[in-house]
Image (spheres, rainbow, N blue to C red):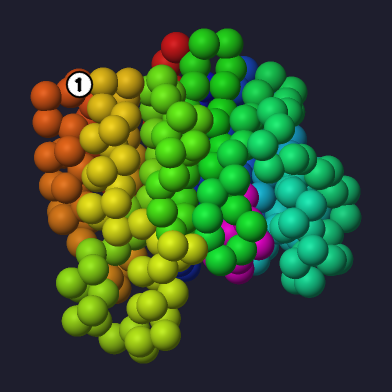
Amino acid sequence: MRITILGSGSRGNAALVEAGTTRVLVDAGLSVRQVRLRAEAARGERLDRVDAVVLTHGHGDHVGHARTIAKAWGAPVYLTEATRRNPHLSALRGVRLFGSDTQFAIGELSIDPHPIPHDAPQVALVFERENARAALVTDLGEVQASLLDHLRDVPTLLIEANHDPALLAAGPYPAPLQDRILSGVGHLSNMQTAAALGELGSGLREVVLMHISETNNQGALAQAAAEEALAGHEATVRLAHQVEPLTVDVGA
Ligand SMILES: [Zn+2]
Ligand SMILES: [Zn+2]
């Protein structure tokens, strides 16, 4: 299994998950053109087919291009009933619903969702093919015990490290927006993410930090916090980027 993170952050999210012959685009916050360009740049081959689009939640940075992407590849769009109610998604065709805590399959890829707290109905996703497993966890205000249970023994973890609270406080965001980000249905700080990594510790082999704010965070701060939490464990830590794609090989 291979995951190519095409873009991660508030200016647009999308990741290509390839499992055997199955290709699934997770989130559609980038244009068809950018998905094609970045997938080809990262993988060294043209992306001529996407079998399905899976949406984590209804925010624009994750679904803004869902309709055009689905149309370009004639791909069905998988989403939860709660996300389906988002008025911006009412014109979507070829919709398939999945339950927010019910495992489902697309071709050779198995997907195990788990609901997480955000200010739109949101899910973490665990991808599995044969014995290879990886999780994508972004856009959540806090890490609940049930999520840690869901992620236990998933060796490859793509998890949000959105902001540094001091940079957020000193930055240009208006107070209501800062409050939203800091709330239990906002986004994870570097420290919240580090605490989760510390809990998962020895089960982790590779960590990729996602959805890093370009305004309220610095990659080096997020990375240092994560590495400190994982000191003494085997796991490596890398950073996803808003515009530079990153490929993650997910072994068994
Ligand atoms: Zn987002
Ligand atoms: Zn969101």
Label 1 element class: loop
- Residue drawn at the location 68% of the way across and 42% of the way down: 100
Q: Position of residue 124 (x, y in %)?
A: 54, 42
Q: Position of residue 242 (x, y in %)?
A: 39, 59
Instruction: Name the quadrant containing residue 76.
Output: top right
Q: Which residue is mark 1?
A: 234
Q: Position of residue 131 (x, y in %)?
A: 52, 11
Q: Is residue 73 visible?
A: no
Left or right: 182 as drawn, with respect to 45: left
Within 10 Å of disc 1 (Cα), the crowding (few <14, some 14-19, many 20+) is: few
Q: Is residue 173 above or below residue 133?
A: below
Left or right: 245 as drawn, with respect to 235: right
Queried whether the magenta region covers residue 4, the answer comes back as no
Instruction: Name the quadrant containing residue 198.
Output: top left
Queried whether the magenta region covers residue 59, the answer comes back as yes
- What type is the residue that disc 1 sits on? Glu
Left or right: 46 as drawn, with respect to 22: left
- Residue drawn at the location 18% of the way across and 72% of the way down: 166
Q: Is residue 105 above or below residue 54?
A: above
**Between 217 and 107, the one nearer to me in the picture:** 217
- Residue drawn at the location 74% of the way across and 40% of the way down: 99
- Quadrant position of the C terminus in the picture: top left
Q: Is residue 219 visible?
A: yes
- Residue drawn at the location 41% of the way across and 47% of the way down: 143
Q: How many marks?
A: 1
Q: Position of residue 214 (x, y in %)?
A: 31, 68
Instruction: Give the residues drawn in magenta, as a range.
Output: 56-62
**Between 198 and 170, the one nearer to me in the picture:** 198
